[in-house]
Image (spheres, rainbow, N blue to C red):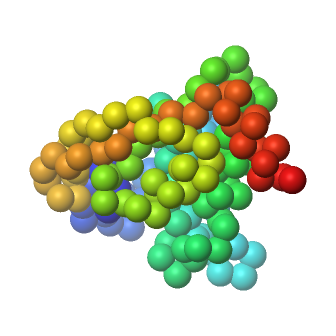
Amino acid sequence: KLARLPWPYTLSMAQDFLRSIPEPTPEKAFFIIEHPKKGLIGCVTLVTELGFWISRPHWHRGYGMEAASALIDWHFDGTGAENIRSSAHHNNVASLKLKAKLGFVMTGKEMRFSHALQHNVQHVTTALSRADWRAKRDDLCA
């Protein structure tokens, strides 16, 4: 479960959230991942950290990698930022594996409040440098 989302998350909360999203920029972006035949299958965001969510039936199909890679490219191409931060619940193995494939490296661990669980949970913090992304992107495209 996502640490920052309220729980339970109602349809009206989702509609209000979608109406509140500003136009994306390379510095701050939220994108819906929509499959042409299946509709909304996830999202990818970069505000203070890179984050993504893919619905369970669409795991292990490359959607997270494709969406996150595109957003990372757009961010580094459109800003002077030298790194991107991200984090994941310590038990979210799939998220941590995807971040490792993208080139993120672990920078530490910290406790964060989970609205869904209503208590603090350990998160693994990660970072990706511009230089590491360029090297990783070249490997991914080879």
The outermost residue toward the left is 119
Q: Quadrant of the N terminus?
A: bottom left
Q: Is residue 35 left or right of residue 47?
A: right
Residue 23 location, quadrant: top right
Q: Residue at x 34, y 56 (%)?
A: 2
Query: Is residue 85 depicted above or below 101 in this figure?
Result: above
Q: Position of residue 59 (x, y in %)?
A: 55, 74
Residue at 23% across, 59% down = 116
Q: How many marks?
A: 0
Residue 49 shows in the view? no
Q: Does residue 1 lie above or below 18 as drawn?
A: below
- Indicate the quadrant where residue 66 lies: bottom right
Q: Residue furthest right?
A: 142
Judging depth in this view, the residue of 103 and 49 nearest the camera is 103
Taking 34 as reference, is 89 above or below it? Answer: above
Closest to the observer, 6 or 78 = 78
Q: Is residue 33 left or right of residue 115?
A: right
Q: Kindly identify the residue that appears in the image at 58 percent across and 34 percent down.
A: 128
Above or below, 101 relative to 94: above
Residue 25 image offset from top left, x and y in percent: 68, 32
Q: Residue at (62%, 48%) from the top-left corner? A: 102
Asked whether, in this view, residue 59 is left or right of residue 24, the answer is: left
Identify the image quadrant of residue 38: bottom right
Q: Where is residue 104 shown, x and y percent of the image? A: 55, 41
Decide if residue 56 is in sight here.
Answer: yes
Q: Position of residue 17 (x, y in %)?
A: 44, 51
